[in-house]
Image: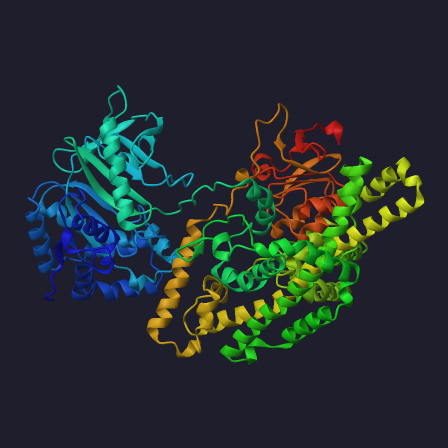
Amino acid sequence: MTEKITGGLADFAADDVARAGGKGANLGELVRHGFPVPPGVVLTTSAYAALLADTGLGRRLDRLLESGSDGSTIRDECARTAMPERIRAEISAAYASLGAGPVAVRSSGTAEDLAGAAFAGQHDTYLNVLGEDAVLAAVTDCWASLWTDRAIAYRKREGIAPGKAAIAVVIQKMVPADTAGVMFSANPVTGERGDIVVDASPGLGEAVVSGRVTPEHYVLDGSGRVRAFTPGGREVAIRAAAGGGTQEYAARESTGPALTRQQLTELARLARRVQDHFGRPQDMEWAIAGGRLYLLQARPMTALPPQPPRLSRFQRLVGPFFVEMFQERPYPLDVSGWMQRGILAMLHGMAGSVGIVFPSVAQILPEEDGVVIRMVPPVPRPTLRVLGAPVSLARRARQFDPARWTEDPRFAAFLENVRRLGGGEPKLLSWREVIALADGAFDAMRGITELRKSYLPGVAVPVLKLRVMLLLLGKSRLASALIAGAETRTSQANRALEALAERVRSSPSLERAFTGLRPGELLEQLGHNQEFREFDAAFRAFLAEYGHRETVSVVLSSTPTWSDAPEVVLGLITAMLGERRAAADQTGVALAELSRHPALRFEPLRRHLLSVVDAAKAGMAFREDSHFYATMVLPPLRRALLELGRRLCAAGVLADPEEVHHLRYEELAAITDPGALPPSERERYRRLVLDRAAKRRELDGIPLLDPAVLFRQGRRPPGVLVSGVPASRGQATGKARIIRGPAEFGLLRSGEVLVCPYTNPSWTPLFQRAAAVVVDAGGIGSHAAIVAREYGIPAVMGTGSGTSLLRNGDLVRVDGSTGRVFPATAREL
């Protein structure tokens, strides 16, 4: 081996990760551009490769990995392997070049300190290493730390093959810090890009990084002015020990902040410079020694929430509608496929028909590293054509009656397109033909778009007329109740589910299976138990009719339909087995109250008002049913996309067909034959998938739009547990049941209060058993509110935090008239 295996930090730049590892490459980049980094050298990955090749360690590690040995066994093997003499000599020379004094020896993995994969704490660092032998031992230990159990597990999660693991080592002059800590150029908790957050403590920064102390916590603005300060605990101070290594000392009592105003200003300036250089928010380690500031490490911030939005009044108005649709983060294939070419294309077409420009998908769902980071409620922009909209809307309202929309020839053509799509078998088609099948699904969706453009004006006009008439009669509050209960395909599906539940109730063995087995186990029993054959046939017939319904959101093609996840439907049936609560007839009560109005003694007015109510109900039915039929496009589309994923698996690009959702539709369409992809292209697609998957994991738990931003509540009155938007009148008492998604449908019991983050049409059967509904998102016109009024149960929408403030089993009283949830007692049940 003749290649030089060490180099000064300045010999490396940000794109030298393969040689210097993430830490070494970042530090080299910083040194090159004049940042205050302590002098250091990098022992490159070539040294580690030489160790594996020259000593036979590589072959031994391969055998250990193939046999499933744990990290401890692999590290022991590394420790027993003598370091080749040439590597020892280069390390010794490098150490001498730094003055042969105390140094920090830091691992620098090739997958470390990168965007989306920080590997924080996965590999080892040794501080205040003194003497040549100690440095050589520390380097060996850094190499071995590539095989800690935690690092092995982390690489597996990031999709990094064991054979591709490599590591460099950074050796730097030790900084005898008086004060040290970490710094973020954006707020890691709130996502605020205008904040700089500093944690500091006396002594070495190890005390802060390891969590041994409660650090002083500063939130600064861009110039270093303090926005917030929290004193530290100063439990201990870690300092360099005289003979090498570190030692903990009892920290002196605080006499004030550890950092001066000038030092905070200098830190803030440094944070902004580093962020500007790398072009993204940075996580940094720093130290101050003898009044001088040093930068010890910089890496991209991971798991950083998006910048908190500043919403207009209009965005707050429309936001609940979009929050309901975007409860899960869309995949790249969702955004570039079904949304851009299907759902949002429909919204663009509808808005354009009245002279309004609807924002692009990129404006609504901005991305970072190819992954959606947030949802921005859209603000449509009117054009001059909007001046002619009233005439256009009035013409369409007269021409197209929503009560007769299924008689339109375009509806029959849509159904025929869906039938033709469903008849194709993707496995028998070429790659280009499967892409054409997906394109056909997007084209079919245009049929629903055209129907909605024609018939939605006929929905708005009677609703507006009804509200005006009720306003004149002084009965505005009855509007929502009067148009609830329209006959829809969703209500028909709910009755069909009720019929399935009745079959279960009539069979003791079936009821025992439903109440005693998990949905997955139950599904297997239905397919194999002859006793359940009749029910299984009825269940399959139900899925054939209604199985195209979405389980999570109509905007996502990545989530399963009812047919894809029949256990969700079995969970709904299980939830319906309890005693059925008699639904309050809100429409009947509202009609009775309206009929008592003196003005309605005038028969022509009475007939006209009732006809307007019927027309408004027909309009609501059109809105719901056109949604129902639009989802018929999802099954053939999903089959096509998953077939593309299956073929990419066979070509070695993907590990699982579902990973296809990490790719964009245009990236899939650019492929002509996955089996013929050159190795470089296969690796490029594979890297895209792994990087985007890592970015999604970073964002786990971060909502696309925090409901609290939309539904800001003032101070809750005494005794109120949760408050929100009153959406369906009445009061009800019951035990709270938190249902976070379709997989938990079977947990709801009759008479419980359904508490959930959102709803969509697939949730409606639960409303037949719930005593009341409390929802984090949504408003008075949202799906949950409409269905709650239909079933006559109280509903509180837009609580922002109902699922986090309430607990399963809490006894609560829901007041849907005031939008408040109170604690209750058993006597109130």
Whole-percent x, y for residue 468 in the image: 77, 42
Whole-percent x, y for residue 232 in the image: 32, 26
Asked whether, in this view, residue 251 is left or right of residue 383, the answer is left
| In the rendered image, the vertical position of residue 734 relative to residue 622, given as above or below | above
Which of 597/480 is in front?
597
| In the rendered image, the vertical position of residue 773 relative to residue 641, given as above or below | above
| In the rendered image, the vertical position of residue 172 relative to residue 457, given as above or below | above
Q: Is residue 676 visible?
A: yes
Which of 141/427 is in front?
427
Q: Is residue 486 visible?
A: no
Task: Name the residue: 56% across, 40% down.
Answer: 313
Q: Quadrant of residue 414?
A: bottom right
Whole-percent x, y for residue 470 in the image: 80, 40
Q: Quadrant of residue 493?
A: bottom right
Quadrant for the C terminus in the image: top right
Quadrant for the N terminus in the image: bottom left
Q: Quadrant of residue 690?
A: bottom left
Asked whether, in this view, residue 539 is left or right of residue 758, the answer is right
Task: Name the residue: 72% across, 68% down.
Answer: 411
Task: Name the residue: 47% across, 45% down.
Answer: 702
